[in-house]
Image (tube, grey):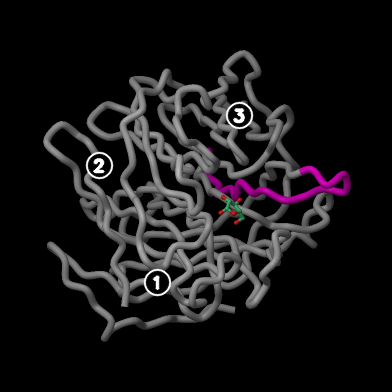
Amino acid sequence: MIKRITLIGLLVMTGTFSFAQNPLITNIYTADPAPHVWPTDTTTLYVYSSHDEPLSNSHIRGMNDYHVFSTNDLVHWTDHGQILHWNRVPWAVDQAWAIDAVYWKGKYYLITCMRGEDQKFRTGVAVSERPQGPFTDCGYIRDADFGQDPAVYVENGKAYLFWGHDRTCFGAELNDDLLSIKKETLVNLRPQLPHVFEAPWVIKRNGRYLLMYPGLPDRGWPQKYYYAEAEKPLGPYEYKGIFIDDWAGQSSTTHGGIVRFKGRDIMFYHGSILSGGLSESRSIMADWVDYDKDGSIKLIRPTKK
Ligand code: FUB
């Protein structure tokens, strides 16, 4: 079911255009945002999201399906409803965790992370003719062990898969069918990413690749956001530092990525402001990204109500 969510009245004026105030989505709990502006329509921003069931507060999360939200102005958001549930995926039995999406050879793909009968998480692929879905299962990616927290970066006809969870991080080029990797390109990025915990996300800026990731500082939980830079998508990466540190409203995890929309970079991530601090009932947030003259990401101070 499509719902239009109007957040006028909660505007934060910053720079050239305005934002609905954080958290962005308040009708359901949302997490692991994957923001995209597709080459087919650069006036619309889509945020693909996993979905925390309300008041689920256990380590095994209550996560069953995915939603996508779209906006043309960062103020009015449309919830396009459920776009995939694990029960429509033959190889999955539960736990629809983090996702990404990719536009590839004229179709839109959800890159998912769900648990199979053997209790292992796999990186799934589902397809649609439309960015807002619904999506149909195509199977899961072979040879992407520890298949959690996927992100796909596309450039020059090549699709790169990044993934990682529980202190791992891998990268590889995908084959054209998106269902297998080119094994000879597989790299273990963990040694290059101090503090890394999970959920890599890659963008290109000024000819360099920025890989951002939630990590654990030496003092422990909750996760913070760090990044590293490279000359090629699969590295080697040089650690740059932290860009989201402590803030009131964090959940134990955070997860997201930067997208460029209408000329400005925006960081999407999640926290637990809406649930009053429940780390299993999270909400998507967004803030502007600014850079220093040398290209470093300036520290983001999350804005909220
Ligand atoms: O949302 C479920 C898991 O929590 C994700 O896979 C992690 O990145 C963390 O956000």
Name which residue lies at 53% across and 41% down. Answer: 151
Compared with residue 60, is residue 186 higher up or lower down, i.e. above or below? above
Identify the disc placed on residue 57: none
Identify the disc placed on residue 297: 2
Disc 1 secondary structure class: loop
Amino acid of disc 3:
Asp
Image quadrant containing the N terminus: bottom right
Residue position for label 3: 176
Amino acid of disc 2:
Ile
Residue position for label 1: 24
Amino acid of disc 1:
Leu
The furthest residue to the bottom:
9
Compared with residue 305, is residue 174 higher up or lower down, i.e. above or below? above
Give the spatial CA distance, label 2 vs label 1. 22 Å
Name which residue lies at 31% across and 68% down. Answer: 74
Return the x and y of residue 280 as percentages of the image width and height.
60, 66
Name which residue lies at 63% across and 20% down. Answer: 182
Q: Quadrant of residue 233?
A: top left
Give whichever of discs 2 and 1 has the lower sequence position.
1
Give the magenta part as a residue range: 104-120
